[in-house]
Amino acid sequence: MRNIKLTIEYDGTNYHGWQIQKNAKTIQGVILDAIKKLTREEIVLNGSGRTDSKVHAYGQVANFKTNSNIPPERFAHALNRILPDDIVVKKSEEVDMDFHARYSAQAKIYRYLIYNSKFPSPLLRNRAWYVPYSLNFEEMMRAAEFFRGTHDFSAFRAVGSTVESSIRTISRISLEKNSDIISLEVTSNGFLYNMMRIIAGTLVDVGRGKFKCEDVKGIIESRDRKKAGQTAPPEGLYLVRVYY
Amino acid sequence: MRNIKLTIEYDGTNYHGWQIQKNAKTIQGVILDAIKKLTREEIVLNGSGRTDSKVHAYGQVANFKTNSNIPPERFAHALNRILPDDIVVKKSEEVDMDFHARYSAQAKIYRYLIYNSKFPSPLLRNRAWYVPYSLNFEEMMRAAEFFRGTHDFSAFRAVGSTVESSIRTISRISLEKNSDIISLEVTSNGFLYNMMRIIAGTLVDVGRGKFKCEDVKGIIESRDRKKAGQTAPPEGLYLVRVYY
């Protein structure tokens, strides 16, 4: 038996997120069906984590165990022949039997794109959050600094989500502006549910003047979701990379 | 009567090009219907030039004359309320009565995107030409230099297209590589039919070794379409800007 690691890019627009569901088209469901079609086995497919409906990925990671004699590196080609063109396996490789896409993950990079202009962009629809009001980018840059480091991110997770600990370490956060597009990139050892989208929404609230940049320190310390900003919409979010 | 200039962004994926046609959805047709709905007049809508099916625009320009009392700068908002979300008017303004989107144009910028990777990109499908074979980017850069300047571009226009002169001046050509994406940008006082797509296809043929970079000089001089490279597919092409 072999353990196969897949690296997957997808356009999440037309899916009900990663996680398999009955009666809804999901990315995990579509990939699992493709693997079963190839191997004719019962398969368990572990993802590195869920992504919500409309969220995209450049480098989602998943693994599965198989007795198939398909060479590990050929799974990418073989699966891509079956998969729809909005899901592509960029790499397939054999990994140690104890590798688990979720539990072995050390850190992830997420990117969030904001399109800040008077009118929406047809070429970025479903790809970025369209924000029409003017944003103070310098203030947003200053605010972003407060997220770096190890914090209890309770204020930045969806109400009702339950995990053991809400302490995470953001090792890198960057905000770049390229004409009308603002790109936020965050590297962390883990992301709470909606954490990246609430960080993006809070930074936009700083940019529009609802918060001052130094307010972010207090919001983090409050550990109160109600103190933080809006949850940014899913279409601007990209899972860029998972580190193992 | 007023002459109104529109600057338009569109995702051309779901259209049979710019030019109005019976029984086919075109960008000009959809915009014209929206203007007529607003003004309740017979309208002539002039575009700066046609774009083919699946070709995109960041800055297509069109103009029309109207007796409507809608303030010129309000047309953008009013039209965007009617238009589908893959066409957006970014700006509307009053111009001199003798302004004509096509005949007044001085120069245009077109961009062509190539996605050069082992597997296609779901997030760039319908947005770039997927080229799986390896490309020698340095050779492509050298080849691009030969296009700059004033030439008879007969070798770089679709067979059967007839215009008075095939002499055009390329004032700027740039080729950039950013990880897997190659971006070609050309500024010219005019583009023959398919000229940009044949230039892109010829540069890819140089990159894959079918031509040497110095062959491009002879191809241009031959004025023979059969000597030039393939016509790159439409989905990688963007009309970026029209100068007046």
Image: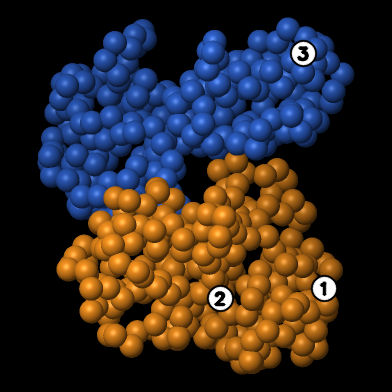
Chain colours: A orange, B blue
Left or right: where does residue B66 sit relative to residue B156?
right
Q: In terms of secondary structure, where does tag 1 sit?
A: loop
- Residue B212 seen: yes
**Whether residue A168 is situated above or below residue B28 in the rendered picture:** below
Residue B118, horizontal then vertical, whole percent: 26, 56
The three-letter code of the residue at mark 3 reads Thr
Tell me how far mark 1 sits from mark 3, CA to CA.
Answer: 45 Å
Residue, far right: B69
Tell me how far mark 2 sits from mark 1, CA to CA.
Answer: 21 Å
Number of numbered discs on residues: 3
Label 1, on which residue? Answer: A211
Q: Earlier in the sequence, mark 2 or mark 1?
A: 2
Q: What's the mark number on residue A186?
A: 2
The three-letter code of the residue at mark 2 reads Val
Residue B88, horizontal then vertical, whole percent: 65, 35
Q: What's the mark number on residue B66?
A: 3
**Whether residue A185 is situated above or below residue B158 in the rendered picture:** below
